[in-house]
Image (cartoon, grey):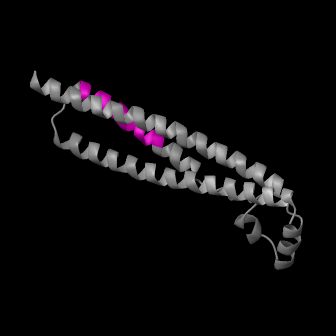
Amino acid sequence: MSATERNLTAAHAEVKAEIARTDTKTGLLLAFIGAVLAGAWTVAKDTPLNPAAYVVGGCGMVLLVGAAGLLLRSVRPNLRGRHGFPLWATLTPGEITTTLSEVDLSADIAGLSRLAVAKFTGLRRAIDLTCLGGALIVLAAVIAVVGGAV
């Protein structure tokens, strides 16, 4: 195996690992958002809140739901099949052998890298929305406490 082939193989493995890490982070953030939404809903439905707390908390909940939507979109499977198992599922065993003999690893790296960047972008936007939504929910709690004390 030449140095170029080793470098291509290493780059391919690195991009695939980054995609896996992003998907793992996405799963953890989805679980966190679900817990925050469930907790906020439980507290809000059992606590008398003033209108300002409802509005601010509602906006925070909407942002968290939006963040969850972005996360789900970033891990949505692509079944159009340019590479990976969707492609293999459409081929006969002979066609798989032929296709694998013609694999252009650099093209696959470029395609996977674009996929990774799209996933990173979605994750980053979801994190921003999660932070903003969480801040609004905390602000709603402060408004409820301060408003209830007045």
* Front residue of 120 and 10: 10
- Percent across and percent down for residue 116 are 65, 48
Q: Is residue 124 visible?
A: yes
Position of 62 with respect to 144 (left or right) is right
In the image, is 80 to the left or to the right of 92? Answer: left
The residue lying at 89 percent from left, 71 percent from top is 98
The image quadrant that residue 79 belongs to is bottom right
In the image, residue 80 above or below residue 29: below
Q: Nearer the viewer, residue 112 or 92?
A: 112
Q: Quadrant of residue 139?
A: top left
Q: How many numbered markers are drawn? A: 0
Residue found 85% across the figure and 62% down from its top? 103
Residue 95 higher or lower than 118, as above or below: below
Residue depicted at x 83% and y 73% = 96
**Position of residue 94 in the picture relative to residue 19 (left or right):** right
Q: Percent x, y for residue 134?
A: 35, 36
Quadrant assignment, res 61: top left
Is 113 rendered above or below residue 140? Answer: below
Check the image and name the residue furthest to the front.
Answer: 3
| Membership of 31 in magenta stretch | no
Residue at position x 36%, y 31% in the image:
59
Specify the principal SS of the magenta part. helix
The stretch drawn in magenta includes residue 64:
yes
Q: Single out the residue that lies furthest toward the left.
A: 149
Residue at the extreme bottom:
93
Which contiguous range is marked in magenta? 52-67
Quadrant position of the N terminus in the picture? bottom right
Q: In the picture provided, is 72 more to the left or to the right than 90?
A: left
Q: Where is residue 150? Give x, y as percent.
A: 10, 21
User: Is residue 54 something one can see in this rendering?
Assistant: no
